[in-house]
Image (cartoon, grey):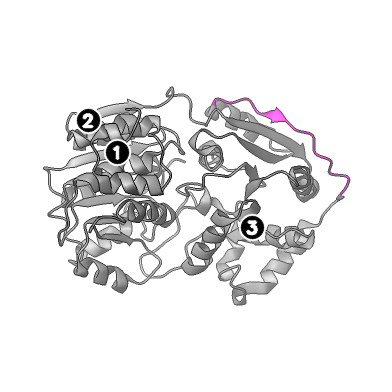
Amino acid sequence: MESFEQMGLSQNILSALKAMKFDKPTEVQGTAIPEILNGRDVYVRSKTGTGKTAAFLIPIMQQARPGRDPAALVVVPTRELALQIDGVAKKLAANTRLHITTVYGGVSLNPQIDSLEAGTDLLIGTPGRIIDLIERGAARLEEVRFLVLDEADMMLDMGFIDDIEYILRSVPAERQTMLFSATSRKEILDIADKHMRNPYHLSIGPDDELVVTTIKHTYTIVPNTKKVSALLSYLKARTGESSKSIIFARTQMAASALYEALSDFGMKPLLLHGGMTQARREKTMRQFKTEKSGIMIATNVAARGLDISNITDIINFDVPDDPIVYIHRVGRSARMGKDGRAFTIFSTDQVRELKNIEYYSNIKMEREHVDTEEFGNVSFGKYFQRSRGRGAGDERYGNRRSAGHDRQSSGGREGYRRSGYHDGRQPRRNYGRR
């Protein structure tokens, strides 16, 4: 459909969409929303940045009625995505009496239990925390009519298959199920076949088009001693343009060291990694989203599930270990049909990684010249030592785990994920990609 008005939405929802400046539906929304409103299960495969969140929230908000226990459950892989969906849902519910509760690991259970006890209509959460609340009797799912599995492929990569099966057994069989994924894989299709009733299949773009086509993919190859210089040169060339960049590092320590290096060269970057407190991370995200331009240094915790529409540049300071992580990272740029740039710094011994990314992502990367002589050999080791010295006392770095890979700082059953993402629960088994 070409307009939201044609969908028969209530005036409350239409007013909220107008306030959110949603002028017309995206392709995903225009096709999926009418099918969901007609009661169909839907399976949607489309790239990030195509409007999938509103595609399931709008029909849920249209049909849900205030009650005590959740009428809708949205399951997502990461707390960042949960918070993003929470923000959209609350805007859509602004003119209604619907209550929304969002739950995730790494924070106290008690406020989440209190919110559920007070009554909620839409429950958004990560698998581990949802199961914790089910087992404590706080999350009562007998009234769930709408179930959404968002970023289903990412949940499988993170090893949540058993948790997803547990949640699916905990909700009524008579429900409407919506499954959203960026990729079409056998495991996803198996879930759809097993748990959905004659779903409407919607695929946006060809199956082999994993990466947004409006992204320009470039790279440089330099010795390890020139990596920081290459980064500084690229950023300097983009100065003066309305650029908003995310720089990805592999570990928390590398991200913190980059923060020190860029600060030394007069830049004002932000820092985001899993060792920081949740409050600090949320503050960083709010600041980055409101700035018209800027730089954020991040680990893979930011690679997926963050809805920021005006990212112009994704910079891979560290080449991802898995080509699919490259796809997740660069998907932060070119949102909602806009153009974007992805720049990757390869060291001289990483030519094979370059070819793997091109092959798996079905793209051709262009070599970009960067002038590394202007900055010389910037000692990255010096900045590693400086960031290590700050330790747990500096809230920018979180805790001493920043010396390792990106982990979630928490206790109990909360644990490390192979992919660097986190939810707050160690999966029973890991079916993730190796």
The residue indicated by pointer 1 is: 179
Q: Quadrant of residue 261?
A: bottom right
The residue indicated by pointer 3 is: 255
Q: Give the image location of residue 361, x and y in percent.
A: 54, 29
What residue is drawn where x is 52% and y is 60%?
286
What residue is drawn where x is 78% and y is 60%?
266
Q: Give the image location of residue 375, x and y in percent.
A: 86, 50
Q: Give the image location of residue 173, x and y in percent.
A: 12, 44
Q: Which mark is residue 98?
A: none
Which residue type does callout 2 highlight? Pro
Q: Secondary structure at mark 2?
A: loop
Q: Which mark is residue 199?
A: 2
Q: Quadrant of residue 355?
A: top right
Front: mark 3 or 1: 1
Q: Are marks 2 and 3 in contact (CB under 8 Å)?
A: no
Q: Which residues are magenta?
A: 362-374
Q: Give the image location of residue 231, x and y in percent.
A: 74, 47
Does label 2 or label 3 sit earlier along the sequence?
A: 2
Q: Secondary structure at mark 1?
A: strand
What residue is drawn where x is 53% and y is 58%?
285
